[in-house]
Amino acid sequence: MFEAPGSTLEFNPDGYMEVELASGRTLRVQAVEEVPLLRLDEFVATGNADVFQQCLSLLGASALDRERLQRRAGEQSLARALDAVERTARKIEQELVDRALPAQERRRPRGAQEAALLRPRGTPERLIGPSRLD
C-alpha cells in the first residue's frame, strides 16, 4: 500500500524506515500500521464515511502487524475506535460468508451445556439447533 503524504502527515519517530534508492537518494517508507491509524484518527475527528471505508480496507492489508497496530492505537488513544472498526469488519466478513454459503441448520439435538457455551459466543440459534435436557 502506498500513502502519498500531505502537508499534515507527521511521521511517528519509529513509524518508518529509510530505504536507499539506486540513485543514492534516501526515501522514507512509512510503516504499514501507521496508514490505517492516520485514517482512523481522521475518521474519529470527522466521521467521514469515505474515511471509514478506507479504514476497513486498510485493515485487510496482508503486511499488517496486528500486535503493532493495536499497540500504536493504544499509544494514540485510538484503541476503542480500532476495536469498533475491527468488529464492523468481522461482521461484514461474516455477512459475506453467510450470503455465499447455503443456509445451514442443525437438526440433531445438542446437549444443554454445549448449547449454553455457544450462545454467549454469538453462535446463531439455527446452528446451535435443538437442545436436549442432560
Image: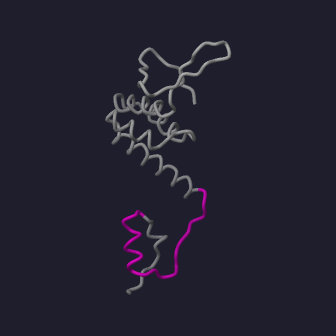
In the image, residue 68 lies at what x, y percent? 44, 39
Q: Give the magenta part as a residue range.
A: 100-122
Taking 35 as reference, is 103 left or right?
Answer: right
The spot of residue 100 in percent (x, y) is 60, 57
Judge by depth and name the residue closer to the eye, 40 or 79. 79
Depth check, front residue: 3 or 23: 23
Residue 60 colored magenta?
no
Question: What residue is at 39 percent from the left and 40 percent from the top?
Answer: 71
Dividing the picture into quadrants, the one containing residue 85 is top left
Quarter that holds the C terminus: bottom left
In this view, the residue in front, 85 or 11, is 11
Outermost residue, right side = 22
Quarter of the figure with the N terminus = top right
The type of colouring in the image is one colour
* Vertical side of 120 occupied by 107: above or below: below
Rendered location of residue 45, percent (x, y): 34, 28
Query: Which of the 4 image quadrants contains residue 24?
Result: top right
Task: Kindly identify the residue that appears in the image at 44 percent across and 14 percent down.
Answer: 7
